[in-house]
């Protein structure tokens, strides 16, 4: 089976080679100097189509792959030069020719030619002409992006360009659900897209561009076709299938220079999830990490109860109701408003079988094993609301305000069959758990930017986070593994409950002053403060056999904790550009003051710390860089690990905090290499990171079989992580795109297990290679292979995954797309050895210029029952098998507005 796609690709490649001849040469100016980044395009005079295109390299060289025995018009354009057109007649032999362009052209003369080019570059902006990459099967932005050189869309719907994640997606310069690219990737219609602009070195605050290091910031702007502006466009899609399956997915968009409005909705029970719980928790709303130069890390953790998350967005049953709207409005020329509202409701059924092995300290010997079968029902209601205001009366002043609210209601009920195995024997019990949480958070941001003169720039930013969490946990089990003061033993079942209430109010404020010493150097003075105040209250109670409530009032079972944290700091950074090197050394001075009060006792800690940092970028060539970054950070825990009363993390996991915890100090080195060559669309990047943490907050765990009691402490041992990733991709012969990437991560952690210092290591590896074609009138094929190796202390797990995708637009009306994935999951000694595969396919019929589209689609056509997964903690390894939705066939009808 694996040989067939390779043979097909080899055949298509051979055909392509046999049908093309090579026309290369050099583009020169009047003085015989090579012209870099000149546009060269070959127009077939008979077919009136563009058969090939190129952009010259730094030596002015171009290569075109043309058809033999054909007449071509070769069009050339270069800003500042006169457009040129020559006629070429090919034979069966390769051709070479040098071409001289005349000076005297103006920029406007080159615009028409540039617009026709599939790819063009102007400054830090790469412009892709979408139609040049479409074959006819594309239905959404994601389908187009995957065909662009240097652009990838990962499994989470996040866009990556040249190895960097796109932080902002815009349409016609207006934010599209700021803070996440997934909604745009999955919903913007492909037929509405004219141009895709990649904005490198992006800074949405014009006054700070060039003052800050923005080399890692990438944004994307979608330009719409002229017929989609000032008109409503979108589609209404509805489908149904056997077993009462349905999908309803209307989308509506409107854009004009003054305002834009978007509506997206999706109602289905076929497993489509527009917004997952993972998406919700990582949705930033576009809020910047304003303290990234501060040297302190005080992250407010979530009191998430461990609501089960989906693997690969698959489960036994998923029903979703989703609605979202996004708007932008230019009130005046200087004042604009924007925002969004997202509502999602889902019901999910999960069925999982898992095995967790706890290891002896510093050994590969299994100490205990838990085999579990979980049947879980989830209900979640998620809400996201944002409004933003930008006031910019001139280029010297800008005032921004943002408000983001995140509201959710989550309910999970699980029936668990647990089998625990250790040296004392085997224990089997049924456990029922119930988790409820309704967390809310409100973020506000105020930013003011003022350019007093060409040498003096001021930036003031302030953010406020208010978070309120109320998780409730209930476990009904046959055995009570923990000794809790006040707990009544001897009941027919152990019904234990815990309420938690955690409130956080955090304010960050920072003033930056930039002084331009020269056009290539500046000083940055920073004055800032972070203040956080938190409350943590928890209580336990037991339901007795007679129905009465036994409140556990002992102080060990309860928490009433207040915690304040303050970090006042000032920083100094000096940025200088000398030749090809940009270097920014810096230092920050901190005064920390912390107080936590519990059990009638207050503990205060204050100290000062000096933290250096360094950023250096070497510009090897215009599109080739080497970047080094060094950061020292003080890492602080929030209130969750300070509360000393017992907290039930799970039916077999009890946690008690440590009020005397201090901060950890981390040192992170990162080195990144990047190269992008427009001549052959070669894209190379590699990144390696090394981090070491001293005084890390670690766990002192006592295991009794599979039951654990833990408390945190500051470790004297060194935790280390080395991670790296790299990618090589290029386009060739106009219609082919190849990519190879790898990701490696090695970690070593130190804890205390059953009174013994325990070190644990993990080494995870992922390798992917793939090749894809992009023909207009032939079937297009993508084939690839992914290998994942997870090397844990107890075992090594492998996943081999060859995959293929075929899409074909034929008879000017039909689109056929099919995707296949094969998985082989096994461990080192083959005690785990599973093989499964997934096949999906769709056939679409739509006449040219018709607004109606007819589609039949099938998911999981091979009716695969389950998938595998594995994970690693610092004490155990876990392998699991989870049930997925069965085969679905859906017939749908879409009307394009």
Image (cartoon, rainbow, N blue to C red):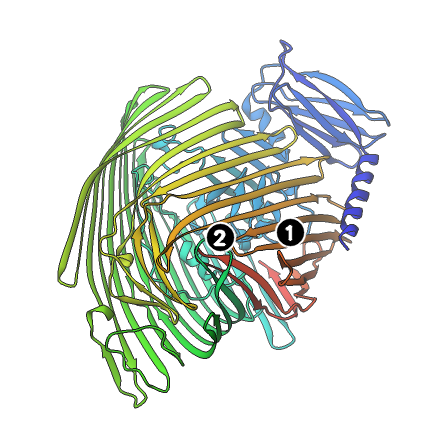
Which residue of the protein is positioned furthest toward the top in this rendering?
31
Looking at the rendered structure, the number of numbered marks drawn on it comes to 2
Pointer 2 residue: 254
From the viewer's perspective, tell me whether residue 339 is left or right of residue 189.
Answer: left
The N terminus is located in which quarter?
Answer: bottom right
Determine whether the residue tagged by mark 1 lies in a helix, strand or loop.
loop
From the viewer's perspective, tell me whether residue 401 is left or right of residue 369.
Answer: left
First in sequence: mark 2 vs mark 1: 1
Q: Nearer the viewer, residue 74 or 366?
A: 366
The picture places residue 311, in percent across and down from the top left corner, at 53, 61
Q: Nearer the viewer, residue 554 or 85?
A: 554
Q: Is residue 306 above or below residue 105?
A: below
From the viewer's perspective, tell me whether residue 885 is left or right of residue 814.
Answer: left
The picture places residue 169, in percent across and down from the top left corner, at 47, 46
Q: Is residue 92 above or below residue 693?
A: above
Residue at 54% across / 40% down in the picture?
725
Answer whether residue 628 is visible to the viewer in this image.
yes
The picture places residue 690, in percent across and down from the top left corner, at 44, 38
Answer whether residue 267 is visible to the viewer in this image.
no
Q: Residues within 10 Å of mark 1 (few under 14, many from 20)?
A: many
From the viewer's perspective, tell me whether residue 544 is left or right of residue 810.
Answer: left
Q: Is residue 466 above or below residue 732?
A: below
The C terminus is located in which quarter?
Answer: bottom right
The picture places residue 240, in percent across and down from the top left corner, at 62, 72
Q: Nearer the viewer, residue 158 or 177?
A: 158
Q: Nearer the viewer, residue 319 or 164?
A: 164
Disc number for residue 138: 1
Determine whether the residue tagged by mark 2 lies in a helix, strand or loop.
strand
Q: Residues within 10 Å of mark 2 (few under 14, many from 20)?
A: some
Residue at 52% across / 65% down in the picture?
266
Residue at 47% across / 24% down in the picture?
618
The label nearer to you, 2 versus 1, is: 1
């Amino acid at each position: 089976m694996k040989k067939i796609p390779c043979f097909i690709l080899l055949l298509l490649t051979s055909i392509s080679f046999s049908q093309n001849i090579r026309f290369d040469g050099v583009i020169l100016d009047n003085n015989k100097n090579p012209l870099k980044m000149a546009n060269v395009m070959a127009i077939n005079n008979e077919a009136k189509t563009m058969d090939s295109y190129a952009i010259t390299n730094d030596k002015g060289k171009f290569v075109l792959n043309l058809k033999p025995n054909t007449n071509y018009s070769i069009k050339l354009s270069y800003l500042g030069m006169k457009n040129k057109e020559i006629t070429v007649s090919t034979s069966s032999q390769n051709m070479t020719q040098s071409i001289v362009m005349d000076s005297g052209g103006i920029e406007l003369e080159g615009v028409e030619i540039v617009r026709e080019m599939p790819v063009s570059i102007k400054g830090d902006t790469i412009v892709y002409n979408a139609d040049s990459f479409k074959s006819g099967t594309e239905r959404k932005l994601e389908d187009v992006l995957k065909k662009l050189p240097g652009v990838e869309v990962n499994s989470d719907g996040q866009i990556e360009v040249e190895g960097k994640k796109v932080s902002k997606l815009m349409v016609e310069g207006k934010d599209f659900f700021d803070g996440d690219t997934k909604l745009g990737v999955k919903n913007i219609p492909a037929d509405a897209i004219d141009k895709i602009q990649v904005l490198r070195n992006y800074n949405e605050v014009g006054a700070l561009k060039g003052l800050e290091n923005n080399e890692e910031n990438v944004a994307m702007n979608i330009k719409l076709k002229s017929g989609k502006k000032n008109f409503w466009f979108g589609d209404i899609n509805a489908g149904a299938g056997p077993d009462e399956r349905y999908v309803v997915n209307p989308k509506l968009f409107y854009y004009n220079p003054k305002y834009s409005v978007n509506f997206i909705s999706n109602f289905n029970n076929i497993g489509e999830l527009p917004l997952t719980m993972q998406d919700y928790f990582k949705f930033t709303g576009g809020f910047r990490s304003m303290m990234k130069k501060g040297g302190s890390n005080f992250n407010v953790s979530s009191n998430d109860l461990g609501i089960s998350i989906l693997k690969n967005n698959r489960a036994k049953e998923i029903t979703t109701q989703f609605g979202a709207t996004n708007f932008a409005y230019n009130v005046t020329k200087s004042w604009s408003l924007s925002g969004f509202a997202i509502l999602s409701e889902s019901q999910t059924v999960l069925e999982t079988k898992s095995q967790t092995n706890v290891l002896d300290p510093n050994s590969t010997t299994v100490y205990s094993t838990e085999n579990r079968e979980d049947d879980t029902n989830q209900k979640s209601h998620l809400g996201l609301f944002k409004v933003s205001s930008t006031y910019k009366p001139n280029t010297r002043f800008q005032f921004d305000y943002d408000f983001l609210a995140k509201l959710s209601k989550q309910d999970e009920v699980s029936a668990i069959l647990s089998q625990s195995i250790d040296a004392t024997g085997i224990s089997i019990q049924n456990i029922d758990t119930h988790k409820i949480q309704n967390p809310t958070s409100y973020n506000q941001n105020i930013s003011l930017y003022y350019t007093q003169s060409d040498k003096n720039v001021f930036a003031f930013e302030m953010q406020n986070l208010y978070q309120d969490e109320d998780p409730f946990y209930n476990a009904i089990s046959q055995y009570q593994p923990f000794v809790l003061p006040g707990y009544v033993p001897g009941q027919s079942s152990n019904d234990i409950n815990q309420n938690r209430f955690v409130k956080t109010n955090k304010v960050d404020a920072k003033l930056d002053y930039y002084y331009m010493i020269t056009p290539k150097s500046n000083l940055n003075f920073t004055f800032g403060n972070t203040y956080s105040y938190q409350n943590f209250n928890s209580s336990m109670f037991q339901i007795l056999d007679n129905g009465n409530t036994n409140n556990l009032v002992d102080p060990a079972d309860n928490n009433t904790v207040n915690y304040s944290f303050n970090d006042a700091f000032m920083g100094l950074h000096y940025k200088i550009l000398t030749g090809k090197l940009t270097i920014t050394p810096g230092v920050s001075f901190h005064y920390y003051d912390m107080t936590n009060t519990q059990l009638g006792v207050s503990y205060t800690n204050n100290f000062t710390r000096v933290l250096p940092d360094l950023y250096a970028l070497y510009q090897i060539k215009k599109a080739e860089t080497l970047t080094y970054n060094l950061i020292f950070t003080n890492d602080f825990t929030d209130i969750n690990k300070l509360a000393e009363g017992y907290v039930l993390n799970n039916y077999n996991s009890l946690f008690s905090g440590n009020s005397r915890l201090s901060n950890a100090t981390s040192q992170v080195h990162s080195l990144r290499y990047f190269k992008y060559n427009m001549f052959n669309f070669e894209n190379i990047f590699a990144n390696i990171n090394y981090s070491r943490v001293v005084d890390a907050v670690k766990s002192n765990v006592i295991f009794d079989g599979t039951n654990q009691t833990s408390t945190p402490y500051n470790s004297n041992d060194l935790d280390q992580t080395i991670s790296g990733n790299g990618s090589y991709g290029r386009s060739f012969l106009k219609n082919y795109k190849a990519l190879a990437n790898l990701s490696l991560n090695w970690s070593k952690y130190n804890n205390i297990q059953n009174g013994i210092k325990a070190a644990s290591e993990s080494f995870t590896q992922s390798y992917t290679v793939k090749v894809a074609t992009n023909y207009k009138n032939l079937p297009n094929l993508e084939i690839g292979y992914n290998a994942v190796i997870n090397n844990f202390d107890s075992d090594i797990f492998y996943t081999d995954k060859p995959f293929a995708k075929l899409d074909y637009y034929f008879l000017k009306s039909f689109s056929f797309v099919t995707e296949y994935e094969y998985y082989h999951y096994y461990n080192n000694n083959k005690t785990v050895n599973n093989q499964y595969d997934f096949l999906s396919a769709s056939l679409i019929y739509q006449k040219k210029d018709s607004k109606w589209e007819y589609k039949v689609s099938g998911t999981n056509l091979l009716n695969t029952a389950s998938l595998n997964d594995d994970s690693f903690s610092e004490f155990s390894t876990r392998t699991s098998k989870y049930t997925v939705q069965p085969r679905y066939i859906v017939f749908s009808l879409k009307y394009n507005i």
